[in-house]
């Protein structure tokens, strides 16, 4: 209960110690013990199978005929101190803040199938996915389709027909008919991809994933713990 209160509400250790009538060190120790257990559980499916790696997700999608939705989310973290190596690595060009990026994969219902690839915010979304070996997994499972946003155009270009990104923007002066067709295609792709945005929104309801003020090295474990709990909640709906 202490760990859940900390993850969901972001209650400080001192306040939890008072609320539960224990010493602060007991709270810190309890969270430190329970959080990695939650992070290692993987992501639940209605069949009882738990997906723990991106390879598991692709194998599951191939077996069940699931179209995957992939996107990245960024969580603000503390800026490294002056003089520390890699101080600029966490500066995200998208949000202009120090962040850590996580890649999220969801199904058509917005259920989280995998959350990982935790990288400094400066790394591009496509690069973060490729570091996780997504190119090899796409080649190994050619029947699996992945819907992505415009940030993954490079991945879509490398795997045409299998990775589906929004259509490229038209050049100025395009005919009205072509403009209307482009807009309709973009909206259709967006409506099919939107479940992964809903999955990310579920994660961001947890206070610890809105802005992480702890040690940066603990954030990946925190993300995995929250994502696993969210996946459990989704299959009970």
Image (cartoon, helix red, strand yellow):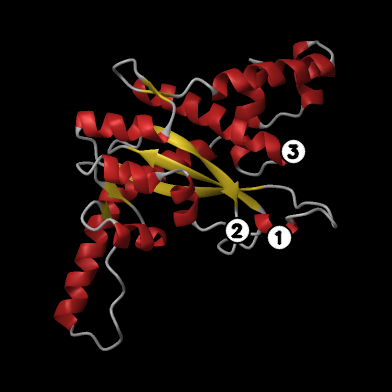
Q: Farthest residue to the bottom: give it.
A: 173
x 50%, y 37%: residue: 203
Residue 165 shows in this picture: no
Q: Earlier in the sequence, mark 2 or mark 3?
A: 2
Please provide percent x and percent y for residue 210: 61, 43
Please provide percent x and percent y for residue 64: 21, 29
Q: Which one is in front, 139 or 29?
A: 139
Task: Give the side of residue 163 with respect to residue 7, left or right.
Answer: left
Distance between mark 2 and mark 3 Cα atoms: 18 Å
Q: Farthest residue to the left: give it.
A: 177
Residue 96 shows in this picture: yes
x 40%, y 35%: residue: 54
x 54%, y 31%: residue: 224
Q: What label does residue 53 carry, if any?
A: none
Please provide percent x and percent y for residue 141: 25, 40
x 63%, y 22%: residue: 35
Q: Which one is in front, 18 or 42?
A: 42
Mark 2 secondary-structure assignment: loop
Which dot, 3 or 1, sits closer to the camera? 1
Mark 1 secondary-structure assignment: helix
Asked if residue 105 is positioned above or below residue 64 in the image, the reply reads below
Question: To which residue does mark 3 refer?
Answer: 215
Q: Evaluate if marks 2 and 1 touch, with contact meaning CB atoms under 8 Å apart.
A: yes
Q: Which one is in front, 101 or 137?
A: 137
Q: Earlier in the sequence, mark 3 or mark 1?
A: 1
Distance between mark 2 and mark 1 Cα atoms: 8 Å
Question: To which residue does mark 2 refer?
Answer: 122
Question: To which residue does mark 1 refer?
Answer: 88
Q: Residues within 10 Å of mark 2 (few under 14, many from 20)?
A: some
Residue 138's image quarter? Answer: top left
């Amino acid at each position: 209960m202490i760990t859940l209160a900390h993850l969901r509400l972001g209650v400080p250790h001192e306040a939890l110690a008072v609320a539960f009538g224990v010493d602060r060190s007991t709270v810190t120790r309890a969270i430190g013990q329970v959080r990695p257990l939650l992070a290692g559980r993987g992501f639940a499916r209605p069949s009882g199978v738990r997906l723990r790696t991106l390879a598991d997700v692709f194998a599951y999608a191939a077996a069940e005929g699931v179209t995957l939705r992939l996107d990245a989310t960024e969580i603000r973290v503390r800026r490294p101190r002056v003089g520390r190596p890699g101080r600029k690595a966490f500066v995200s060009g998208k949000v202009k803040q120090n962040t850590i990026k996580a890649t999220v994969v969801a199904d058509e219902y917005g259920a989280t199938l995998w959350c990982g690839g935790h990288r400094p915010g400066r790394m591009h979304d496509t690069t973060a996915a490729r570091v996780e070996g997504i190119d090899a997994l796409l080649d190994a499972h050619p029947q699996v389709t992945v819907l992505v946003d415009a940030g993954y155009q490079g991945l879509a270009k490398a795997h045409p027909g299998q990775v589906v990104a929004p259509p490229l923007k038209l050049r100025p002066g395009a005919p009205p008919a072509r403009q209307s067709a482009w807009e309709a295609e973009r909206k259709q792709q967006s409506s099919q991809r939107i479940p992964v945005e809903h999955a990310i929104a579920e994660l961001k309801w947890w206070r610890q994933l809105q802005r992480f003020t702890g040690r940066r090295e603990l954030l990946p474990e925190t993300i995995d713990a929250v994502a696993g709990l969210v996946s459990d909640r989704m299959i009970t709906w």
